[in-house]
Image (cartoon, helix red, strand yellow):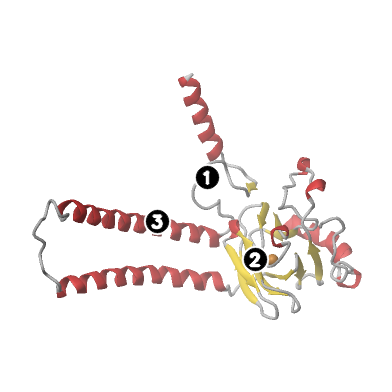
């Protein structure tokens, strides 16, 4: 019995760490920490997070030890005659300076990363993303104005044999090439409310604000399907406007472009005007 348990535990560990060529962008059972990175952006966020985790752990241990020391050494029983000291200038300077120094140390890599996530001077293509109540619109301004809308597939139409996921798969997934610097221009429909475009595996979370444009960039390193959801409480169907991104090789992307030009070109675009997916609600 015990042996079986131990064996299955190790099998579980092996399956958790198994290397896969295709990224499987989903939470794992008993997962701790952030999800697997698909971009250098997310890799940096994870290592920054891990660094902070060490710092936080040290601070928690020191403060807990100080508290325990005070509770044990200076309680009414152990220390019946308390000291009447009120001020201690060197101590006050130290307990102000040390936390300020810690914050300054965190600020440096933090600012550096904010600038890194903000823009890249060698952008190879642009994806424009518009938030609507309650779906996403995508445009490829560098590729003959391909544009389409993307709706969640309703639960009763989900086909698990195709790898579709409840509440996450969409009728028109975004297709993007790997190893390409992609600018993301994120906005909201001017008559609409604020949404937020979020892809955890990419390290992207940006508000889609009506009439304004937020910009960031990604470089996807691994082919696969990545999911995200609107992260701004935007109304009744906030939970039903997922983001699905298929990252493919550059050759596959070129092939997809040919198909997409037929299907989604601006002159043959009904989807942007009649933006209603039958059966979605
Ligand atoms: Cu939304």
At x 72%, y 47%, the residue is 165
| Tag nearer the camera, 3 or 2 | 2
181 relative position to 73: left or right: right
For disc 2, the marked residue is 233
Q: Can you name the residue that lies furthest to the bottom here?
A: 211
Percent coordinates x, y for residue 278 in the rendering: 87, 58
> CA–CA distance between discs 1 and 3?
16 Å
Give the side of residue 12 with respect to residue 129, left or right.
left
Q: Name the residue that disc number 3 marks.
A: 53
Ligand 1 under 8 Å from disc 2 Cβ: yes
User: What residue is drawn where x is 75% and y is 72%?
Assistant: 142
Whole-angstrom CA distance, mark 2 to mark 1, is 26 Å
Q: Which residue is mark 1?
A: 31
Residue projecting furthest to the left: 81
Ligand 1 image position (quadrant): bottom right
Query: Marks 3 and 2, Cα distance to the nearest angstrom?
Result: 29 Å
Sequence-first tag of 2 and 1: 1
């Amino acid at each position: 019995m015990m042996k079986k348990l131990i064996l299955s535990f190790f099998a579980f560990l092996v399956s958790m760490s198994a290397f896969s060529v295709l990224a499987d962008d989903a939470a794992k059972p008993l997962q701790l920490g952030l999800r697997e990175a698909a971009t250098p952006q997310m890799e940096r966020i994870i290592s920054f997070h891990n660094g902070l985790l060490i710092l936080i752990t040290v601070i928690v241990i020191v403060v807990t030890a100080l508290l325990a020391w005070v509770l044990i050494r200076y309680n009414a029983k152990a220390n019946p005659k308390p000291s009447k000291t009120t001020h201690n200038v060197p101590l006050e300077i130290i307990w102000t300076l040390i936390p300020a120094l810690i914050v300054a140390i965190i600020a440096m890599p933090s600012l550096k990363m904010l600038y890194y996530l903000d823009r890249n001077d060698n952008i190879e293509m642009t994806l424009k993303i518009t938030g609507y109540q309650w779906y996403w619109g995508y445009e490829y301004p560098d590729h003959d104005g391909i544009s389409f809308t993307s709706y969640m597939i309703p639960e009763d139409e989900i086909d698990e044999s195709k790898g579709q996921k409840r509440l996450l798969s969409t009728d028109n997934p975004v297709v993007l090439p790997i190893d390409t610097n992609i600018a993301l221009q994120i906005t909201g429909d001017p008559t609409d409310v604020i949404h937020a475009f979020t892809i955890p595996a990419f390290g992207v979370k940006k508000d889609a604000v009506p009439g304004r444009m937020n910009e960031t960039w990604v470089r996807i390193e691994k082919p696969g399907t990545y999911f995200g959801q609107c992260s701004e409480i935007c109304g009744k169907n906030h939970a039903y406007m997922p983001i699905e991104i298929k990252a493919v090789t550059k050759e596959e992307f070129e092939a997809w472009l040919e198909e997409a030009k037929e299907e989604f070109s601006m002159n043959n675009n009904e989807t942007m005007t009649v933006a209603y997916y039958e059966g979605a609600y």
